[in-house]
Image (tube, coloured by chain):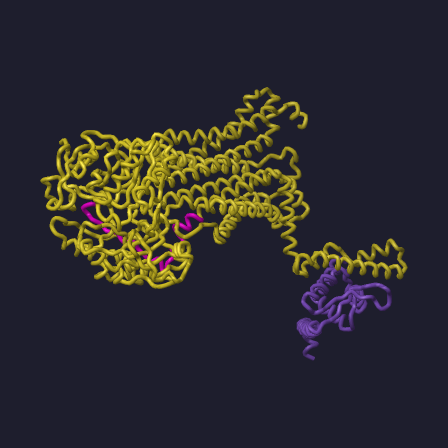
Amino acid sequence: MANEKRQRANLLLGTLDMLILRTLLYGPAHGHQIGKHIQRSTDDFLQMQHGSLYPALHRLERKGWIVSRWETAPDRNREFKYYRLTEKGRKQLVVEESQWKQMTEAVARVMWPAAEES
Amino acid sequence: MRWWQIRRRDADLERELRSDLELEEEEQRENGLPPEAARYAARQALGNTTLIREHAHEAWGWATFERVSQDIRYALRQLLRSPGFAAVAVMTLALGIGATTAISTLVYDVMLRPLPFTEADRLVTVEEKVAEWSNIYPTLPVSANHFTFWQRHSRSFDSMALLQQFPVPLGSGDRPQQVEVMWATPGIFSVLRVQPTLGRPYTVSEGQKINEHVAVLMYDLWRQHFNANPGVLGKTIRLDGAPYTIVGVMPRSFHVPSLQWSATIGETDRSRPVEVIAPLAFSKERLAEQMGDLNYFGIGRLNQGVSITAATGDLDALQYTIGESLPANEKATLSAALTPLQDTLVGNNRKPLVILLAAAACLLLVGCVNVTNLLLARAVGRRQQMAVAAALGASRAEMVRMAIREIVVLAVAGGGLGILLASGVVPAMQRYLPPALDFRGPLHVDWMGAGCALILAVIASLLAGAVPAFMISRTAPFEVLHSESRLAGESRGNRRARRALVGIEVAVSVALVLMTGLLTTSLVRLMSVDRGFTTERTITATVELPGKSYEDDQHRATFYKTVLDRVDRLPGVEQAAFASGFPLEADDWGDMARVQGDSRPDTQLPIENVRWVSPDYFSSIHLGLVAGRIFSQDEWGKNQALISEKTAKTLWPGRNPIGRQFNLGNPAKEKPFTVIGIVRDARTVSLAKPDPMLIYVPYWYRTEGTAGLMVRTRQEPSEMARAIRETIWSVDGTVPVPEVRALAGVITDSVANQRFEMYLLLVFAASALFLAGLGVYGVITYSVVQRNREIGLRMALGARRATAYRLVLWDGLLPVAVGAVGGIGLAFASMRLVRSLLFQVSPYDPALTTGAVCVLLIIGTLACLLPARRAASVDPMQTLRTE
């Protein structure tokens, strides 16, 4: 069980940045929302600890792909730190997406050669 | 990321994480979990907050700095917990690094730093060699006649110049100032590749006799004396009473060393920086003298690509041609000697500097060994801690980092303190630099020196820390934690290593102590050698007669006589005398005495130093008479002479020289001298060796414009200074009296360099001894603590206190004894370096050698006694109870 979990996490590590950027494409969100969104979208397959999200968010911000600001949430009377995609981040998402696509296709060609031929 | 932002960022992250937690908790509660479980679940969902923060820091690029600062903080905390150890280690390193930095700054500046001239490596000094005189003068200064010939025919030189340096009166009013003048042929500007910043250099035709009344000012004189007025060009100054037109001012950055022929400086070189450059012009008669005018300092710039060997060959060929054309009575075999300018300037200062550098390095080595020793002891004491760390999963790299960080902090602290120490000491050391080397302005530890010192510090501490770090990295937690913790002893290899280190320390210290002992004994013997004259209650004054108003011997002698008459009448004066110079100052008059009937050519005659003196010269410095009498004032004008014992033995072997006659110069033209007395051989040229042959002639026969007045007084001589100056000025107020001082000071000055070296060595040796003692003490104290149980058991079984003492002393003195023997070997092996600096001491002096070993044994014993007492007072009951 523990092993399986680690595998999932590993897979996640390489793609976390892309997933965050993709999530933010819908609009600004705070950390908890981003985490929940990824978890929900994958039907809880990617069960990550929210904690690992924050260093990644800070890293992306440092690279200038996202920006952050403390804002009051529309539905309740509380401040959250909202992250927004920048123009640079949008471009980066395109790059990462195509890279990811290339990689999965390459992996697929190795794994299921017959499917490719047909 | 700026460091002050880190706190704000952290707070920000904290808040972010907290809000995430809260949201999650709310959500879980809505899912129906009880509050306690919800909080727990939320925490689990978030993960390890410390880890998150660390990762976030890494994302900010802040982790490395944080780790380093944490290391430093940790190391500081650890060091502060044992302030004694920290202080000793830092001071040790600071001492070693400070000494090494200071000395190497000095050595670099003096021996290695390129001279401040364009392509300085092409500069050479030129000397002549005369085979017939080589036993007295291996090399000689250059003659104007030969120089002219070289200039015309040599192909190896870009340019050449002849120089002389001596001070003359500046101005013409009463009590004039003195300036140091470099008299140089016009070639000097192209040799040094330097042009005046204002005006022009003097030309070749201005370098000829009659036209030579032009001068170029050095920047400092221009600024101080002429307020940096650019209108000074074309104005006239009076040098030596004659008018000189100022044609140029040298750039501010231009400094010249004192370029003088070593033998003419003598033991007491106190020449000042050059202030004026003026032409050195030769009269027709001078230029015609083929062998009689070997007087000038030769300097040249080699052509591009010409080696010194090639240039020497070139000049040797020319010298041969000159030698061939010499008349029969001056027949000589001539050649030339070329030396790189920098080597000439360094001269015989090289050896003392190298020795000092070696001594400083030794001190640093002892310091390093000591710090290693301390660190080793500490490492052993911390085995438990390290084992725990290892058991808890610290990686080997982490353990080494733990061990190293302390050392690095020590290194930086020690190095920084060392640099401070060096930069404080260096300016003070500059005062002891010989003037030939001290011309570049204030000496200080520069950035390069400081950088080197820090690198040295890090290397030294890494060396010192390597062994303990290695040991720590090999810690096997299981073993350490399983052994009885309180009794865990030092491993055998470790103990052996520490003893070996003490041995090394002792060896180096013994060598240093022995070296210092030798040089100190040398200096003491040098100062107490029977010099044959006295300095008590004698005051000296230098007099510089302006050449213009005192052109011939007659005028000068009359002036000197008048001054003597008046000084003699001053209250408190016993005797007063004028002479060509003071004891231990170089004689500038060498001549060949020709005994009547001797018809050998000049070059085969023995050379004597000739001094002109007034009759009371001998009594005022108590220079004893062996036979005959001294000339008296009543015999004014008579050609009489006194000779030294050595001269007597050489000129008239086995016969009584009194009443016999000899000639100086051409016998056809000049009257002979009659010998009327024989003077004791003394040490008036150098304390280190007996005088060469000397001849004393009366001052009415010949005098120079520069003279030394010696006054023996009945009272404290310093009280007379003013009276003497006033008396000289009462005769002629235009005569500069640049210096009045006690004769004893002149003597002390002649050994100033040796004394400086000795003091430095003394400090180094004392420090090394102290460190060695500390090393022994540390090792023994530690081993006594380790062997507490063993000693206690022995006592319980009936051993006496004496046994405990013997046990500890044996343990401590063994490495000391072995080290001492090694040190003596080390010292003997390096004696080649020191031998020539010693005076009346054998480098293998048994008493000093034994002394050095004894000093170390005493220090070792003292260092052992305290721990030994502790061992002897071990209470056996106590030991057994803890067992």
* Whether residue B126 is situated above or below residue B366 in the rendered picture: below
Decide which of B268, B262 is in the foreground and name it.
B268
Q: Is residue B629 rendered to the left or right of residue B726?
A: left
Task: Give yes or no for residue B106 being in the magenta stretch.
Answer: yes
Residue A97, picture quadrant: bottom right
Quadrant location of the C terminus of chain B in the rendered image: top right
Q: Residue drawn at (48%, 33%), measured in percent from left and top?
A: B815
Residue B584, picture quadrant: top left
Decide which of A72, B510 is in the foreground and name it.
A72
* Whether residue B736 is situated above or below residue B208 in the rendered picture: above
Residue A48, picture quadrant: bottom right
Q: Position of residue B770 (x, y in %)?
A: 50, 35
Among the chains pictured, the one given purple colouring is A
Q: Position of residue B784 (x, y in %)?
A: 58, 30
Q: Residue drawn at (54%, 47%), measured in percent from left and top?
A: B416
Q: Position of residue B376 (x, y in %)?
A: 56, 40
Among the chains pictured, the one given yellow colouring is B
* Whether residue B366 is situated above or below residue B344 in the rendered picture: above
In the image, the segment drawn in magenta is B105-134
Decide which of B209, B599 is in the foreground and name it.
B209
Quadrant location of the N terminus of chain B in the rendered image: bottom right
Q: Is residue B405 rendered to the left or right of residue A59?
A: left
Decide which of B502, B289 is in the foreground and name it.
B289
Task: Give yes or no for residue B748 being in the magenta stretch.
Answer: no
Q: Decide if residue B346 is in sight here.
A: no
Q: Decide if residue B569 is in sight here.
A: yes
